[in-house]
Amino acid sequence: MKFRLLFILIFYTSRYFCQDNINNIIEYSYIHDLKTSVEEDSDFLYFDQDKSIYFQYGKANEKIKFEDINNSNFKAELLTYFFINNNSKDYFFLGYKVPPKKILTTDTIPEIKWTINPTKKKKILGYDCLFATAIFRGRSWNAWFTKEIPVSYGPWKLHGLPGLILEAEDSSTAYSFIVKKITLNTQAILNKIFLDYIEEKKKNLISFEEYIKKENIQKRDWFNKILAELPLGTEMQNPILRENDLEVQFEWEKSPEIF
Protein backbone atom coordinates (compact mmCIF):
# COMPACT_ATOMS: atom_id res chain seq x y z
CA MET A 1 0.00 0.00 0.00
CA LYS A 2 1.31 3.41 -0.89
CA PHE A 3 2.41 5.37 2.16
CA ARG A 4 0.40 8.55 1.85
CA LEU A 5 1.59 11.37 4.05
CA LEU A 6 1.01 15.08 4.18
CA PHE A 7 3.42 17.35 6.03
CA ILE A 8 3.27 21.12 6.43
CA LEU A 9 5.06 23.56 8.70
CA ILE A 10 3.33 25.56 11.37
CA PHE A 11 3.67 28.92 9.61
CA TYR A 12 0.75 30.11 7.50
CA THR A 13 1.22 29.27 3.86
CA SER A 14 -0.70 32.29 2.67
CA ARG A 15 1.70 34.58 4.53
CA TYR A 16 4.79 33.12 2.90
CA PHE A 17 3.68 31.97 -0.54
CA CYS A 18 0.65 33.93 -1.69
CA GLN A 19 2.58 37.16 -2.10
CA ASP A 20 5.95 35.75 -3.17
CA ASN A 21 7.13 34.09 -6.33
CA ILE A 22 8.85 30.71 -6.21
CA ASN A 23 12.52 31.31 -6.92
CA ASN A 24 13.78 27.71 -7.29
CA ILE A 25 12.16 24.39 -8.22
CA ILE A 26 13.63 20.91 -7.69
CA GLU A 27 11.90 17.86 -9.16
CA TYR A 28 12.57 14.47 -7.53
CA SER A 29 11.58 10.86 -8.10
CA TYR A 30 10.48 9.10 -4.92
CA ILE A 31 11.03 5.35 -5.33
CA HIS A 32 9.62 2.70 -3.00
CA ASP A 33 10.89 -0.82 -3.63
CA LEU A 34 8.14 -3.17 -2.46
CA LYS A 35 10.26 -6.26 -3.36
CA THR A 36 7.42 -7.61 -5.50
CA SER A 37 7.06 -4.31 -7.38
CA VAL A 38 8.46 -0.78 -7.49
CA GLU A 39 6.43 2.40 -7.10
CA GLU A 40 7.79 5.71 -8.40
CA ASP A 41 6.18 9.04 -7.53
CA SER A 42 6.76 12.69 -8.45
CA ASP A 43 8.00 14.97 -5.66
CA PHE A 44 8.72 18.70 -5.81
CA LEU A 45 10.68 21.20 -3.72
CA TYR A 46 10.11 24.95 -4.08
CA PHE A 47 12.46 27.18 -2.10
CA ASP A 48 14.36 30.40 -1.59
CA GLN A 49 16.80 31.31 1.19
CA ASP A 50 14.28 31.50 4.04
CA LYS A 51 11.35 29.23 3.13
CA SER A 52 10.46 26.10 1.22
CA ILE A 53 7.56 23.84 0.33
CA TYR A 54 7.96 20.16 -0.48
CA PHE A 55 5.17 17.93 -1.78
CA GLN A 56 4.21 14.84 -3.73
CA TYR A 57 1.60 15.01 -6.48
CA GLY A 58 -0.09 12.49 -8.76
CA LYS A 59 -0.65 8.74 -8.81
CA ALA A 60 2.01 6.04 -8.43
CA ASN A 61 4.15 5.58 -11.56
CA GLU A 62 2.57 8.61 -13.20
CA LYS A 63 5.17 10.95 -14.70
CA ILE A 64 4.35 14.47 -13.47
CA LYS A 65 6.25 17.65 -14.33
CA PHE A 66 6.13 21.09 -12.74
CA GLU A 67 4.11 22.37 -15.69
CA ASP A 68 1.38 19.82 -14.87
CA ILE A 69 0.92 21.31 -11.39
CA ASN A 70 0.86 25.06 -11.83
CA ASN A 71 -2.10 25.22 -14.20
CA SER A 72 -5.89 25.22 -14.08
CA ASN A 73 -6.01 21.42 -14.10
CA PHE A 74 -4.45 21.19 -10.62
CA LYS A 75 -6.41 18.80 -8.34
CA ALA A 76 -5.90 18.97 -4.57
CA GLU A 77 -6.97 15.34 -4.14
CA LEU A 78 -3.83 14.28 -6.04
CA LEU A 79 -1.60 15.75 -3.31
CA THR A 80 -0.23 12.97 -1.14
CA TYR A 81 2.13 14.77 1.23
CA PHE A 82 3.75 18.17 1.60
CA PHE A 83 5.81 20.37 3.95
CA ILE A 84 6.11 24.09 4.36
CA ASN A 85 9.33 25.17 6.04
CA ASN A 86 10.35 28.56 7.38
CA ASN A 87 13.58 27.46 9.05
CA SER A 88 11.61 25.88 11.88
CA LYS A 89 11.51 22.35 13.28
CA ASP A 90 7.74 22.46 13.81
CA TYR A 91 5.66 20.77 11.14
CA PHE A 92 2.08 19.86 10.46
CA PHE A 93 1.49 16.30 9.21
CA LEU A 94 -1.61 15.00 7.46
CA GLY A 95 -2.00 11.22 7.72
CA TYR A 96 -4.41 9.08 5.77
CA LYS A 97 -4.24 5.71 7.52
CA VAL A 98 -6.63 6.47 10.40
CA PRO A 99 -10.28 6.44 9.22
CA PRO A 100 -12.65 8.06 8.59
CA LYS A 101 -10.63 10.92 7.08
CA LYS A 102 -7.18 12.47 6.84
CA ILE A 103 -5.99 13.90 10.14
CA LEU A 104 -3.81 16.99 10.46
CA THR A 105 -1.22 16.81 13.24
CA THR A 106 1.67 18.85 14.61
CA ASP A 107 5.11 17.26 14.42
CA THR A 108 8.44 18.57 15.74
CA ILE A 109 11.32 17.21 13.67
CA PRO A 110 14.42 16.31 15.73
CA GLU A 111 17.87 17.41 14.61
CA ILE A 112 19.43 15.01 12.10
CA LYS A 113 23.07 14.37 13.02
CA TRP A 114 24.86 13.91 9.70
CA THR A 115 28.37 12.55 9.21
CA ILE A 116 29.99 14.03 6.09
CA ASN A 117 32.64 12.16 4.12
CA PRO A 118 34.69 14.94 2.43
CA THR A 119 36.60 12.46 0.25
CA LYS A 120 33.59 10.75 -1.32
CA LYS A 121 32.40 12.88 -4.22
CA LYS A 122 30.39 12.71 -7.45
CA LYS A 123 28.57 14.97 -9.90
CA ILE A 124 24.78 15.06 -10.14
CA LEU A 125 23.23 17.07 -12.97
CA GLY A 126 26.52 18.98 -13.23
CA TYR A 127 26.74 19.85 -9.50
CA ASP A 128 29.68 18.74 -7.34
CA CYS A 129 28.28 16.65 -4.47
CA LEU A 130 29.56 15.27 -1.18
CA PHE A 131 28.40 12.14 0.65
CA ALA A 132 26.78 12.08 4.10
CA THR A 133 25.14 9.52 6.36
CA ALA A 134 22.68 9.76 9.26
CA ILE A 135 20.09 7.84 11.24
CA PHE A 136 16.65 9.42 11.29
CA ARG A 137 13.68 7.89 13.11
CA GLY A 138 14.94 4.34 12.84
CA ARG A 139 16.34 4.37 9.31
CA SER A 140 19.94 4.81 8.17
CA TRP A 141 20.22 7.26 5.27
CA ASN A 142 22.92 7.84 2.64
CA ALA A 143 22.71 11.24 0.99
CA TRP A 144 24.44 13.29 -1.69
CA PHE A 145 24.32 17.08 -1.29
CA THR A 146 25.83 20.07 -3.05
CA LYS A 147 27.28 23.18 -1.45
CA GLU A 148 26.79 24.94 -4.79
CA ILE A 149 23.14 25.38 -3.73
CA PRO A 150 23.72 26.57 -0.13
CA VAL A 151 20.39 25.75 1.55
CA SER A 152 19.75 23.05 4.16
CA TYR A 153 16.69 21.57 2.44
CA GLY A 154 16.18 18.17 0.90
CA PRO A 155 13.53 15.62 0.01
CA TRP A 156 10.85 14.49 2.47
CA LYS A 157 11.93 15.30 6.08
CA LEU A 158 15.64 15.04 5.30
CA HIS A 159 17.41 18.34 6.01
CA GLY A 160 20.26 19.95 7.93
CA LEU A 161 23.25 19.58 5.59
CA PRO A 162 25.28 22.60 4.39
CA GLY A 163 23.81 22.31 0.92
CA LEU A 164 20.80 21.01 -0.95
CA ILE A 165 20.27 17.22 -0.82
CA LEU A 166 19.97 15.92 -4.39
CA GLU A 167 19.84 12.18 -3.69
CA ALA A 168 19.05 10.05 -0.64
CA GLU A 169 18.56 6.34 -0.09
CA ASP A 170 18.01 4.31 3.06
CA SER A 171 20.46 1.50 3.81
CA SER A 172 17.92 -1.20 2.94
CA THR A 173 17.39 0.43 -0.50
CA ALA A 174 13.63 0.27 0.08
CA TYR A 175 13.28 4.06 -0.15
CA SER A 176 15.13 6.54 -2.33
CA PHE A 177 14.82 10.11 -3.61
CA ILE A 178 16.56 11.04 -6.87
CA VAL A 179 16.70 14.53 -8.36
CA LYS A 180 15.31 14.75 -11.91
CA LYS A 181 15.49 18.46 -12.70
CA ILE A 182 16.81 21.68 -11.12
CA THR A 183 15.35 25.05 -12.10
CA LEU A 184 16.87 28.07 -10.35
CA ASN A 185 15.91 31.76 -10.38
CA THR A 186 12.44 31.27 -11.81
CA GLN A 187 9.37 33.43 -11.13
CA ALA A 188 6.62 30.82 -10.76
CA ILE A 189 3.67 31.33 -8.40
CA LEU A 190 2.21 28.52 -6.30
CA ASN A 191 -1.25 27.36 -7.38
CA LYS A 192 -4.06 29.04 -5.40
CA ILE A 193 -6.03 25.78 -5.15
CA PHE A 194 -3.01 24.30 -3.38
CA LEU A 195 -2.88 27.18 -0.91
CA ASP A 196 -6.62 27.00 -0.20
CA TYR A 197 -6.37 23.26 0.42
CA ILE A 198 -3.67 23.80 3.05
CA GLU A 199 -5.79 26.40 4.87
CA GLU A 200 -8.78 24.04 4.90
CA LYS A 201 -6.72 21.25 6.46
CA LYS A 202 -5.57 23.44 9.36
CA LYS A 203 -8.97 23.50 11.02
CA ASN A 204 -8.56 20.33 13.12
CA LEU A 205 -5.29 19.35 14.78
CA ILE A 206 -3.96 16.60 17.04
CA SER A 207 -0.38 15.90 18.10
CA PHE A 208 1.79 13.78 15.82
CA GLU A 209 2.47 11.37 18.70
CA GLU A 210 -1.25 10.89 19.23
CA TYR A 211 -1.74 10.25 15.54
CA ILE A 212 1.06 7.64 15.43
CA LYS A 213 -0.53 5.81 18.37
CA LYS A 214 -3.84 5.71 16.45
CA GLU A 215 -2.06 4.51 13.34
CA ASN A 216 -0.25 1.78 15.27
CA ILE A 217 -3.59 0.51 16.60
CA GLN A 218 -4.80 0.39 13.00
CA LYS A 219 -1.73 -1.59 11.97
CA ARG A 220 -2.17 -4.11 14.80
CA ASP A 221 -5.84 -4.60 13.93
CA TRP A 222 -4.89 -5.25 10.31
CA PHE A 223 -2.17 -7.71 11.35
CA ASN A 224 -4.49 -9.61 13.70
CA LYS A 225 -7.04 -10.04 10.90
CA ILE A 226 -4.34 -11.46 8.62
CA LEU A 227 -2.97 -13.71 11.38
CA ALA A 228 -6.46 -15.07 12.14
CA GLU A 229 -6.67 -16.42 8.57
CA LEU A 230 -3.33 -18.25 8.80
CA PRO A 231 -2.68 -21.75 10.23
CA LEU A 232 -2.72 -21.98 14.03
CA GLY A 233 0.68 -21.28 15.57
CA THR A 234 1.92 -19.00 12.76
CA GLU A 235 4.34 -16.36 14.08
CA MET A 236 5.74 -13.13 12.70
CA GLN A 237 9.35 -13.40 11.51
CA ASN A 238 9.88 -9.68 12.06
CA PRO A 239 7.68 -8.30 14.85
CA ILE A 240 8.62 -4.60 14.38
CA LEU A 241 5.37 -2.78 13.74
CA ARG A 242 6.64 -0.05 11.38
CA GLU A 243 9.46 -1.98 9.71
CA ASN A 244 8.12 -1.15 6.25
CA ASP A 245 7.40 2.54 6.95
CA LEU A 246 9.66 5.51 6.28
CA GLU A 247 9.72 6.16 10.04
CA VAL A 248 10.38 3.01 12.06
CA GLN A 249 10.93 4.47 15.55
CA PHE A 250 10.29 7.84 17.18
CA GLU A 251 12.18 9.94 19.69
CA TRP A 252 9.55 9.38 22.40
CA GLU A 253 9.98 5.58 22.16
CA LYS A 254 12.68 3.58 23.97
CA SER A 255 12.54 0.91 21.26
CA PRO A 256 10.53 0.29 18.08
CA GLU A 257 6.90 -0.70 18.57
CA ILE A 258 6.20 -4.39 17.93
CA PHE A 259 3.08 -6.26 16.86
Image (tube, rainbow, N blue to C red):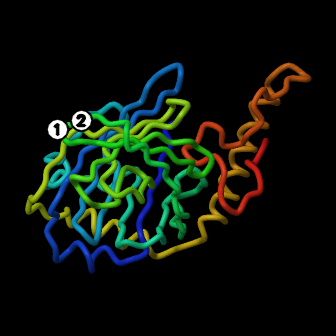
Question: Callout 1: few (<14), some (14-19), or many (20+) C-alpha neighbours within 10 Å?
Answer: few
Q: Is residue 94 visible?
A: yes
Task: Find the distance from the CA under tag 1 to the CA under tag 2.
Answer: 6 Å
Q: Which residue is mark 2?
A: 123
Q: Position of residue 108 (x, y in %)?
A: 54, 68
Residue 176: image tag: none
Q: Quick check: 56 above or below 91?
A: above
- Amino acid at pointer 2: Lys
Tag 1 and tag 2, C-beta contact below 8 Å? yes
Q: Which residue is painted at 44% across and 25% down in the image?
A: 38
Does any portion of residue 77 appear in the rendered image? no
- The part of the image, by quadrant, that contains residue 192 is bottom left
Q: Position of residue 21 (x, y in %)?
A: 13, 68
Q: Name the residue at 37% across, 38% down.
A: 119
Please count the marks in the image: 2
Near-viewer residue (135 or 77) = 135
Q: Secondary structure at mark 1?
A: loop
- Residue 12 versus residue 58: which sits nearer the camera? 12
Describe the element under mark 2 as helix, strand or loop: strand
Which residue position holds label 1? 126
Q: Residue 230 appears at what percent x and percent y?
A: 81, 22
